[in-house]
Image: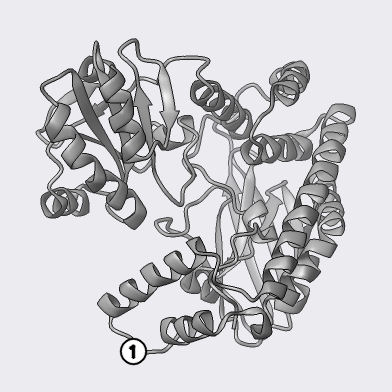
Amino acid sequence: MKPNFILAATLSTVLALAGSSRPLSAQTGPATFATRITGEVVGRPQSRTLWLTEYDADLRVATPVSIPIRDGRFDYTLTDSIVRGYQFVFEEEAAAGSVFPIPFLNEPGELKATLYGEDREQESRVDGGVQNRELQDNRREMFRRYARHTQMGREIDDPKYLSDTAKVLLSILHAPGTPEEERLQYEEKARQLYADKAVYTAEGYALLEAMQQEWARAGADELAASYRRCADEPGLAHLFLLRNMITQQQLSDSFRDSLTALLPQYERLFPQHPFMQRIRNTLAATEMTDGRQRFIDFKLPCLDGTEKTLSELVRGKVAVIDLWASWCGPCRRHSKALIPIYEEYKDKGFTVVGIAREWGNTRAMEAAVEKDGYPWVQLYELDDRQAVWERYGVPQSGGAIFLIDKKGNVVERDPSPESIRTYLEQQ
């Protein structure tokens, strides 16, 4: 049984990146082509269904293609108008909320997929075409660099490293039939246990620190090697790699400058490709949160039936832009913490604007607004149509809060309620 408390990043989070799965204009025009994928599933007799989604899909809300696995084999023909990123995910992993996606590029023709069980999942690959060969070579090198970290991650899964309190909490959290309300209470206790650094034994925390150091070392090596590959051999597979690098990194000035020098050749080769658009959005979001530019403006629908421009709502005021969603528990906790601050300062030049990321319709959002009692204007975006979260650099797994000054500059991302109150008092 894996502990729920390990904060150190895993290889699955390296591969499962945030963003929108909406199709963008195809570089090749409206003409379509077919990609036939035949595959073998090895060492997973429990797996009956494979999910196919775009690489950026949010699995909580995406509508995947379900591909049946029969006698350890599957066959599917994918039609598209552009070569882009896709991923395979096993249905039972998605249901459990712990996935190891297998990425590939839908090059025309035939592809061969070989997907393995948990003990060999890093060997899973999709072969066929020049770009997929490059992509798989890049993945193999990445796994090699993180091999020691992965081994240490398996070691810390040993229950001997857990404190007695953590063992009790885990047994309750994983027990079938635990009422939802009780489960939420224990999850809160688990978060507090992590905050108090009481999850592991002393030996466990020593191993965790070593894991974090190994992660940093491997990450620096991988970043340097990936940049060299992207610079030396510009192509679609390396554009995919470049887009992942930019999404994963907290960009330093030196790394941003290096990317700026590298991007023009990719802009010439792939000006309208979805990977290129992701890179543009990510860089713009990074500059915004570094205080290099104003907040990003949008015109979005409001729950009262009108459309409102964000800049009109915050003009001349200190403001909080609250990116949240009805399905995001942490987002709603952060939003509710803003209510007393809003009530105290709303008549003194302060406002809050909510932007909810919803899917299909606003029914769940409306219920959340009524239940939580948000008193400010609520805008919403359905189905990532304007890529608001992406363009603000917000991960799929949670929202974000941006504190904006009277001139529209971003003062702080994800400030605490105390930090917001202090800023307002100073103003």
Seen in the image, is 326 located left or right of residue 201? left
Q: Position of residue 138 (x, y in %)?
A: 83, 48
Q: In this rendering, is residue 296 above or below 74?
A: above
Q: Position of residue 70 (x, y in %)?
A: 62, 82
Q: In this rendering, is residue 132 above or below 393?
A: below
Q: Position of residue 162 (x, y in %)?
A: 61, 79
> Is any atom of residue 372 visible in this view?
yes
Seen in the image, is 183 located left or right of residue 274? left
Residue type beneath disc 1 = Gly
Q: Residue at x 18, y 18 (%)?
A: 349
Q: Position of residue 411 (x, y in %)?
A: 42, 22
**Which residue is nearer to you in this view: 53 or 30?**
53
Q: Residue at x 77, y 53 (%)?
A: 213
Callout 1: SS: loop
| Crowding at mark 1 (Cα within 10 Å: few <14, some 14-19, many 20+) | few
> Is any atom of residue 40 visible in this view?
no
- Report which residue position mark 1 lands on: 177
Q: Residue at x 87, y 35 (%)?
A: 229
**Which residue is nearer to you in this view: 263 or 201?**
201
Q: In this rendering, is residue 394 above or below 14?
A: above
Task: Assign the C terminus to one quadrant of the image.
Answer: top left
Seen in the image, is 268 located left or right of residue 357? right
Q: Residue at x 32, y 57 (%)?
A: 329
Picture quarter containing residue 425? top left
Callout count: 1
Picture quarter containing residue 272? top right
Picture quarter containing residue 198? bottom right
Task: Assign the N terminus to one quadrant of the image.
Answer: bottom right
Give the colour scheme of this rendering.
one colour
